[in-house]
Amino acid sequence: MMRIKLFIPCLIDQFFPETAVNMKRVLEKAGCQIEYNPDQTCCGQPAYQAGFWDEAKKLGEKFLKDFSEELPIVSPSAACVGMVKVGYDDLFTNTLHHNRCRAVQGQIFELSEFLIHVLKVDYFGAELETRAVYHDACSALRTCGIKAEPRQLLRNVAGLELLEAPDAEVCCGNGGHLKDRHPEIADAMSAQKVHNALDLGAEAIISTDASCLMQLQRYIDREKLAIRTYHIADVLASGWPNI
C-alpha cells in the first residue's frame, strides 16, 4: 500500500468538497493510504498570476512547510500542481528554499497522471451513462503536459461515450485573471466551448480543473442549457455504492 499526501486546493475545499471526497475514494480503491494535513491552505497561484509575488512567496513557503518531500503529493487540480512545478521556480530558485522546493516539485502529481504513470491503474468500475467531451485545461496541457491520461481513464468508464471536440485544447475563458479583467471575452470563449460541445451531441464536459468547470457551468446555468460539467474525480467514482 502506497502512502500519499492529499493536496486539496482552495476552490475545491470551498465549493466542490465532494470532488475531494471522490478523489480520496478513487485513490483508496487504487490501494493508497491517504494522509491529509488540515493546516494546508493556498499554493499561491492567484497572487502569483495577479503579479503579487511577495504574497505568493509567503503562501509558497507555507506550502513547502506543510508538505513532505518524502511522500507523493496528489491533487485534483492541474492548475495548482503546475503552480508548484513551474511557478515556484520563479519564487524559490537560488533562495534558502531552493533544494526543498526542487524535492517537493518532484513529488507532486495531478490525479490522472498519478493514476496512470505512478500507480499504473486505469479502471475503477465507474459507470456513467452520458456523451461527453473532455476539455484540456490550459495548466494541465501546457504546464503539466497532461493530455492522454484523462482520456485513457475516461474510456474505461462504462456507459460513457467520449467525444473529441475540435476545440478541446482552446481556453475556456477562465485562464489567469481573464474572466475578471475581460469578462466579455471570457464569456465569449465559454460560449464557444459549450456550444461546440452541444453541436457534437454532448451532454457533459469533463476536465481536471474545477476552475475551468466553474467558468463553463456559470455560462451553462445562465443560459439554461442542456449540458453539465464533471470533474474527472467525480466521473471515476460514479456508479459506486453510496457511502
Image: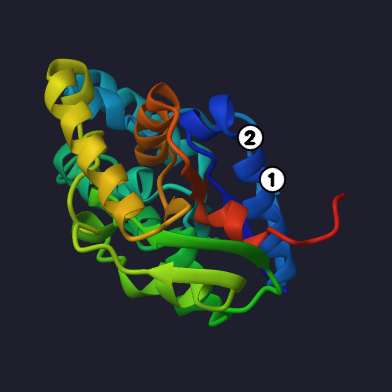
Height in image: 124 above or below 232? below
**Quarter holding the N terminus?**
bottom right
Residue marked by disc 2 = 17
Which numbered marker is on residue 31? none
Q: Is residue 51 visible?
A: no
Residue 175, x across and y down, in percent: 21, 36
Residue located 72% across and 72% down the image: 31
* Frontmost residue, 222 versus 118: 222
Q: Residues within 10 Å of mark 2 (few under 14, many from 20)?
A: some
29 on left or right of 231: right
Q: Where does label 1 land, which residue?
A: 21
The kind of residue on which mark 1 rests is: Val
Mark 2–mark 1 contact, CB under 8 Å? Answer: yes
Instruction: Please give left or right for residue 122 compared with residue 113 in the image.
Output: right
Residue 152 in view here = yes
User: Which residue sits at x=47%, y=65%?
Assistant: 112
Crowd rating for badge 1 (residues with CA inside 10 Å; few <14, some 14–19, many 20+):
some
Place residue 83 in its image quadrant.
Answer: top left
